[in-house]
Image (tube, rainbow, N blue to C red):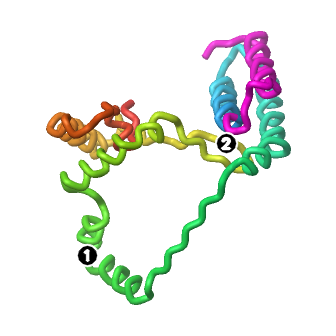
Amino acid sequence: MDLNDEQFINTKNKFYDLLISENSKVEQLSAIFADYGEFLNNCVNNKHIDKRIIEKEIIRVQKIWEDKIYDLVMNQMTPVKSEMKVDNKLVFRLNKEVLKNPIALTQEFLPLNELNIVKIMETTDQNPLQWLFPNVLINNIFPQYKEKIITHRHTVDKLIISYVNELKEKYKGLFINNLEVNKHTNLSVG
């Protein structure tokens, strides 16, 4: 990204205009801050922008998030609680199984067969909106987008993507929404 100081300042001003705009909704603030944070991170290595301007802006925007926006966003969220009790006998048995045969236990918990993967694909297909919008992880320091696994370095992930593509073709009449494979797998093809 080759911006100069003036372009950086114009973008920064647009960010603050967006923050104070009456069209901005509290539900959007975390994504707005996450986007701006990514923009600032991309500017750090830009040789055409004075690093001191970027550093001051990073500190300033983080302070605004932490002091003013974080509580506002958190107060708009609906807490969801869930409890689960696991019997000590089960925990002991699982620990014993892990020590004895970790691969067998892994196979029991991971959906590595065709039927289980197709069930996951059906669930994804029936709830497409949750996959079409990025997930923002909110913490008091700064919000950020949930990272996706970049697959161009992972052979196993490429195999999974290839297999899911085969299943999409095989069961194409089963799925209403034609979501990309990375939506089914939470992998980003890079």
- Image position, residue 60 (x, y; %): 83, 34
- Majority secondary structure of the magenta segment? helix
Q: Residue at x 79, y 45 (%)?
A: 72
CA–CA distance in space, label 1 to label 2: 40 Å
Left or right of 146? Residue 106 is: left
For this view, does 115 lie left or right of residue 139? left
Residue toward you, 15 or 53: 15
* Sequence-first disc among 1 and 2: 1
Camera-nearest residue between 102 and 136: 136
Classify 10 Å Cα crowding around label 2: few (below 14), some (14-19), many (20 and above): many
Q: Does the magenta stretch include residue 180?
A: no
| In contact (CB < 8 Å): disc 1 and disc 2 | no
| Residue located at (35% from left, 80% from top) | 94
**Residue 97, placed above or below residue 116:** below
**Residue beneath the point at 44% across and 86% down:** 87
On screen, residue 140 versus residue 177, left or right, reads right
Which amino acid, by three-letter code, is at mark 2?
A: Pro
Which residue is tagged 1? 101
Nearer to us of marks 1 and 2 is 2
Q: How crowded is mark 1: few (under 14 residues within 10 Å), some or many (20 or more)?
A: few
Look at mark 2 in the image and give the residue it sits on: 143
The magenta region covers: 1-28
Instruction: Look at 66% across and 19% down and name the residue there.
Output: 46
